[in-house]
Image (cartoon, rainbow, N blue to C red):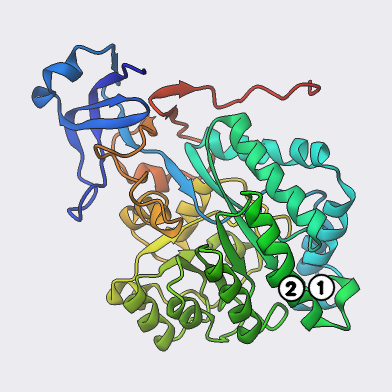
Amino acid sequence: MDNGGVLVDARLVTLDGDDGYRVLEDGALAWRDGRLDYTGPRDRLPRECAARPQLSARGALVTPALLDCHTHLVFAGDRAGEFELRLKGASYEEIARAGGGIVSTVRATRAADEDTLFLASLPRAQALLAEGVTCIEIKSGYGLDFAGERAMLRVARRIGEHLGIRVCTTFLGLHALPPEYADDRDAYVRAVCEDWLPRLAAEGLVDAVDAFCEGIGFTPAEVQRCFGAARRLGLPVKLHAEQLSDLGGAALVARCGGLSADHLEWLDAEGVAAMARAGTVAVLLPGAFYALRETRRPPVAELRAAGVPMAVASDLNPGTSPMPSLRLAMNQACTLFRLTPEEALRGVTVNAARALGLENERGRLKAGLAADFLLWPCAQPAELTYWIGPYPRPRVFVRGCEVATAAAAPRGVL
């Protein structure tokens, strides 16, 4: 049994409650068996906790560890050429319809074996861990056949095991229509819903199900079929919704009791109201907004007024958000979308956990939750969104143990 430990001389930002992100001076954290069992003033630390090995935070700011609740981190190749085409005037849709976009990454990912895919993807996860991200959602969607989707999900699980962090896997079979199904969309949707998803779920590779509801993606009716298959398997759903147009995806996923609707630049009042009623989280992805040079922002003021919880994620992917930095996404969410620093911090902790269905496991410094926390060389929480770039870097603790954020390379890698 792990006898745990205690962190003292800490300036705690627990995020437990709705009273802002006030700093508790001279606080203490105690944990045992990987879970917190005390957070609060040091002078109220229970005697049993005080007897454990102690570590001094030396006045550091202490927050919950971060969660990146929307990534496409596992892939092969890159799309730097498309980045250049966009700068020359081509639109995202034009590139996709010409055979680029998601399908170009599919070609590269299908050509890679699992070891190659793992070695290509691991550094991106290590970059997030170095910023204090100890829980990462990783989607499939670049295989678009059974073998490719399975390989992506297996690699995602392997990354979590290698780094010792929580990885949540999301099956994104309805991401794009692969070329071999260009003349039979129905057959592809049927294969995803009736064959691949049940088989992958039976292997324990799927934590949630997602889809891309868009003109260049899949229709609401096709998404509804996929969600029905997920529901029959007891899997939660989420949705890429209203990124490039308004197809009513946010209202659809809300009606299905979905965890989140993500992107939301074209979200309308009906979608906001549906999300508010259902408690569906709005996941904001400013990296894609920035990379695509979009001008229409998600309706943050309306979401705020309706009480819709807002999460922030990196959307790390090779085409529209090649950004392995959740802290940069926090800064962008403030500067581009007008979130407050507190909303951005809650967006990568409390609300990100909710977007993954993990609100009872992580995202706050509270007894009973995971002992994943960060020590920051900062005077105030706003610094976490104020600085642009790699500073400040936290000390990262997972289940109460400090981890080396430049994780050791796997065997065979120099």
Residue 95 visible in the displayed image: yes
* In this rendering, position of residue 285 left or right of residue 218: left
Camera-side residue of 211 and 200 = 200
Query: According to the image, label 2 marks what residue?
Result: 92
Residue 320 visible in the displayed image: no
The residue under the point 63% across, 70% down is 211
Tell me the number on the disc at residue 95. Answer: 1
Q: Quadrant of residue 171?
A: bottom right
Q: Amino acid at mark 2?
A: Tyr
Secondary element under disc 2, as helix, strand or loop, is helix
Camera-side residue of 101 and 281 = 281
Q: Amino acid at mark 1?
A: Ile
Q: Quadrant of residue 139?
A: bottom right
The C terminus sits in image quarter: top right
* In this rendering, position of residue 63 left or right of residue 119: left
Question: How many residues crowd mark 1 within 10 Å: few (<14), some (14–19), many (20+)?
Answer: some
**In the displayed structure, would residue 87 be above or below residue 380?**
below
Residue 216 coordinates in the image, percent (x, y): 73, 79
Residue 15 coordinates in the image, percent (x, y): 26, 47
The residue under the point 69% across, 37% down is 122
How far apart are the alpha carbons under marks 2 and 1?
5 Å
* In this rendering, position of residue 85 left or right of residue 19: right
The N terminus sits in image quarter: top left
**In the displayed structure, would residue 401 be above or below residue 128?**
above
**In the displayed structure, would residue 401 be above or below residue 66?**
above
Residue 193 coordinates in the image, percent (x, y): 68, 71
The residue under the point 74% across, 76% down is 190
Secondary element under disc 1, as helix, strand or loop, is helix
Q: Are marks 2 and 1 in contact (CB under 8 Å)?
A: yes
Camera-side residue of 292 and 232 = 232
Residue 95 coordinates in the image, percent (x, y): 81, 73
